[in-house]
Image: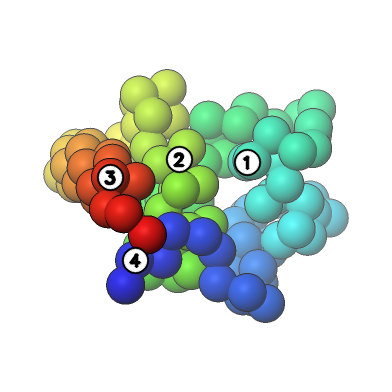
Amino acid sequence: MMNLDPKPDVSLAPLENLFWDYNYSLTGKDLYDFVLEKKEISFLDRDQVKARMLMTVGWYRLIDIFGLKNLKLLLNDDTLKWVWVNDLREQYELARQTIERALSEAVSIPG
């Protein structure tokens, strides 16, 4: 079974530590809502925050937090250009293709 949606009651604590090197008072919920375009944070660039999430939060943790439907929002070209590790960027490009294929198959399966 695929995690299409976020896990209920999943901890957003990994997102709170995203900016450990800055003195921002942002909660995991703030960053979650910012990435999903439900909130604006004037001093942050959305694509850079998404890239930071991809590089610092574990992949399966991201799946739990966002679900596959929302996780594909983190895997766009504008975000991936900020992932400076070439191998990692290539892995995320492959992950994007795999998620898109899985989501299209999930939609086509009669339920």
Instruction: Report the side of 39 relative to 89 (left or right).
Output: right
Q: Cα distance, mark 4 to mark 3? A: 14 Å
Closer to the camera: disc 2 or disc 4?
4
In the rendered image, which residue does mark 2 sit on?
74
**Residue 62 visible to the viewer:** no
Choose the circle earlier in sequence order: 1 or 4.
4
Kindly check if marks 1 and 4 are in contact, taking CB atoms under 8 A apart as contact. Answer: no
As drawn, the label of residue 2 is 4
Dot 4 amino acid type = Met
Instruction: Report the side of 61 relative to 43 (left or right).
Output: left
Kindly check if marks 2 and 3 are in contact, taking CB atoms under 8 A apart as contact. Answer: no
Choose the circle earlier in sequence order: 2 or 4.
4
Q: Which of 15 and 97 is in front in this view?
A: 97
Choose the circle earlier in sequence order: 2 or 3.
2
Q: Cα distance, mark 3 to mark 1? A: 28 Å
Closer to the camera: disc 3 or disc 1?
3
Q: Is mark 2 on a helix, strand or loop?
A: helix
Neighbour class for label 2 at 10 Å: few (<14), some, many (≥20)? many
Q: Position of residue 109 (x, y in %)?
A: 27, 53
